Image: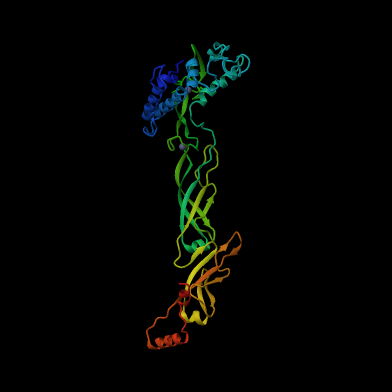
């Protein structure tokens, strides 16, 4: 039976048993940097060391945990510091199962198997908690929903009005085909480093030794190999094509959700969602404001003065607008239901036409003559109101 010297947290952190909190922290920082996975990519041994260092630090940096560890040679949340009988948890394991009165020799004989001695199965469960739960690793079977993806999509003005169908080339994490998402491949295995292939580990409890089924390989003595395709992650980044229908009338800045097209989940959990944020390129003269369309339309002096029926552009094509006699510059007119379809209200917005009066181009004598005549007939000072307020 190999002794699990790896469990000696003082040895793991290369410190003496009377090390002060400061020394523990210093040594931890040094070792954590040395074995950090980011600095040792793909190095499984370094990764193992890194986890051990973290585990050791977790216990030894906490004075209560350290006290338990010093007393029993291992740490568990279930053991009260100060020894058996000292804490409120003592006796919580049922009659005869408190650490104080328990006969460890019962379990030194591992061949007896679990559940054969009094309280044996329960004790094994407690120990599997110690070892299984203290590693800080994500258990391989916990379902975990995939994360969401964000995507920015540019469409032009007309696509936003009429809707469109787009094919997005995205990259998303999908379940690895090689291992089916488990992260491991069958067949080839490696010797379990925890028990050196024996399937059993020895633990020290104070001065006593006892043997347990290796929690890492579950007593098999061998570990399945990490999948070579996904390096044990169970998922791989893959390109994907997603067909998305952009509804008519979509607003700039809208966020559309495509269910299940985010990263795939782990261990049977559902995938995340894909969110598409829509950006709309501006149009040369149609301007959108909610469901309304705004447009500025030039009119001549005579159209504004005499009134006229003029054609104005709308998103449906040309529409007739009646400019009344005496229209002023920047006056606004509403063309009902010539705006954007709002599918929620099942109603269209309006088009707001702002007229901009253009002065006539004066190239000839006849025009000048008419304008002089106009000035004589219509002699009012256009700045009269302005002067009245100065
Ligand atoms: Zn093992
Ligand atoms: Zn894989």
Q: In the image, residue 287 lies at what x, y percent?
A: 48, 65
Tell me the quadrant of the picture where the C terminus can be found. bottom left
Q: Position of residue 188 (x, y in %)?
A: 45, 29
Quadrant of residue 99 within the rendered picture? top right
Q: What residue is at 45 percent from the left and 62 percent from the top? A: 282
**Quadrant in the rendering for residue 281:** bottom left
Q: Check the image and report above or below for 69 versus 173.
A: above
Residue 378: x, y in percent? 47, 84
Judging depth in this view, the residue of 183 and 384 nearest the camera is 384
The reply, left or right, for residue 14 in relation to residue 186 is left
Regarding residue 201, the answer to whether it shows in the image is: no
Is residue 282 visible to us here? yes
Q: Which one is in front, 319 or 27?
A: 27
User: How far from the left and from the top, in percent, is residue 35?
Assistant: 38, 29
- Residue depicted at 44% across the width and 37% down the height: 230
Q: In this view of the protein, which residue sits in the foreground, 213 or 39?
A: 39
Q: What residue is at 48 percent from the left and 63 percent from the top?
A: 157
């Amino acid at each position: 039976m190999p002794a699990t010297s790896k469990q000696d947290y003082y040895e793991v952190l290369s410190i003496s048993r009377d090390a002060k909190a400061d020394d523990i922290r210093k040594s931890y920082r040094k070792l954590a940097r040395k074995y950090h996975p980011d600095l040792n990519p793909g190095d499984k041994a370094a990764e193992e060391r890194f986890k051990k260092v973290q585990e050791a630090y977790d216990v030894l940096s906490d004075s209560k945990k350290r006290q338990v560890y010093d007393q029993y040679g291992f740490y568990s949340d279930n053991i009260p510091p100060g020894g058996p009988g000292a804490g409120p948890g003592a006796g919580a394991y049922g009659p005869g199962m408190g650490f104080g009165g328990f006969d460890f020799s019962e379990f030194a004989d591992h061949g007896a198997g679990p559940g054969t001695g009094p309280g044996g199965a329960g004790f094994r469960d407690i120990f599997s908690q110690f070892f299984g739960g203290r590693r800080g690793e994500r258990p391989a079977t916990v379902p975990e929903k995939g994360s969401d993806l964000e995507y920015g999509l540019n469409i032009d003005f007309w696509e936003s009005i009429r809707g469109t169908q787009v094919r997005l080339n995205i990259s998303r994490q999908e379940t690895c085909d090689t291992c089916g998402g488990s992260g491991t491949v069958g067949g080839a295995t490696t010797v379990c480093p925890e028990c050196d292939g024996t399937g059993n580990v020895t633990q020290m409890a104070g001065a006593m030794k006892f043997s347990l089924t290796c929690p890492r390989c579950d007593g098999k003595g061998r570990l399945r190999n990490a999948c070579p395709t996904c390096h044990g992650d169970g998922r791989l980044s893959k390109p994907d094509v997603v067909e998305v229908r952009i509804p008519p009338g979509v607003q700039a800045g809208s966020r559309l959700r495509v269910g299940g097209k985010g990263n795939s989940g782990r261990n049977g959990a559902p995938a995340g969602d894909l969110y598409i944020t829509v950006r709309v390129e501006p149009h040369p003269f149609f301007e959108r404001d909610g469901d309304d369309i705004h447009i500025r339309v030039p009119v001549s002096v005579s159209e504004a003065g005499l009134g006229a029926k003029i054609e104005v552009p709308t998103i449906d094509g040309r529409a007739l607008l009646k400019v009344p006699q005496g229209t002023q510059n920047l006056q606004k007119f509403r063309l009902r239901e010539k705006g954007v379809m709002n599918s929620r209200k099942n109603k269209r917005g309006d088009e707001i036409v702002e007229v901009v009066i253009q002065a006539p181009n004066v190239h000839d004598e006849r025009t000048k003559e008419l304008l002089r005549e106009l000035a004589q007939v219509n002699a009012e000072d256009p700045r009269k109101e302005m002067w009245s307020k100065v």
